[in-house]
Amino acid sequence: MQKNTVYLDTTIPSYLFDDREELKTLVQITQQWWAQERQNFELYLSEETLTELNNGNYPNKSKVLNSVTEATLLPANPRIIEIVDIYVNNYVMPKNVKGDAVHLAYASFHRLDFLLTWNCHHLANANKKRHIQIIHSRLGLHTPEIVTPLQLFQKEIII
């Protein structure tokens, strides 16, 4: 049986080792998903994910970077940059946070099943879902399910 595909945005690996108190619950959920569920999926990321992780000021940065070595790096394509521009020009994603648009463009262009994120402002946001679907329909693009780790547990989660 073929595994579902998951694109990892920057929040997932960065939350694996985060020690900020205000993120404690999300960190625990992320760690539990990583330990129990990740092997049930094919994991992918983009150069954008790696760049954000390398440039970010993350607690335990070396562990964060090491955690993504098992994920497959998706190839770049000029069409992805065109898609990002369309997202921004159609107000799907903000101009000042283009990384979010890049993550969505990669997951969509490469027809991945899920985009996994804790970014509930620009990505895993029910208010954006219809807008994304309309733009993707116009472009003939696949729309991945944009979810948080909570939505990808196959077994019961214990927090």
Image (cartoon, helix red, strand yellow):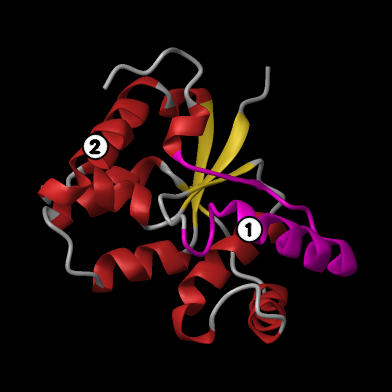
Residue 130, horizontal then vertical, whole percent? 75, 57
Residue at point 66%, 41% (across, down)? 113
Where 56 sits versus 116, above or below?
A: below
Q: Do the residues labelled 2 and 1 touch (CB within 8 Å)?
A: no
Residue labelled with disc 1 = 127
Q: In the image, what residue occupies the spot 70% across and 75% down?
A: 83
Q: How much space separates mark 2 and mark 1, taking CA atoms?
A: 24 Å
Q: In which quarter of the image is residue 157?
A: top left
Quadrant for the N terminus in the image? top right
Residue, x 47% and y 73% (percent of image)? Answer: 99
Horizontal and vertical percent position of residue 127: 63, 58
- Residue sitting farthest toward the top: 155
Q: Residue type at mark 1: give it.
A: Asn
Q: Where is residue 3 in the image (x, y as percent from the top left)?
A: 61, 26
Side of 20 relative to 93 (left or right): left
Q: Answer above or below: position of 72 versus 149.
A: below
Quadrant in the rendering for residue 48: bottom left
Residue 102 among those drawn in magenta: no
In this view, the mark in front (2 or 1): 1
- Classify 90 as above or below 115: below
In the figure, is residue 109 to the left or right of 93? Answer: right
Give the secondary structure at mark 1: helix
Magenta extent? 121-148
Q: Would you identify the image quadrant in which residue 125 lies?
A: bottom right
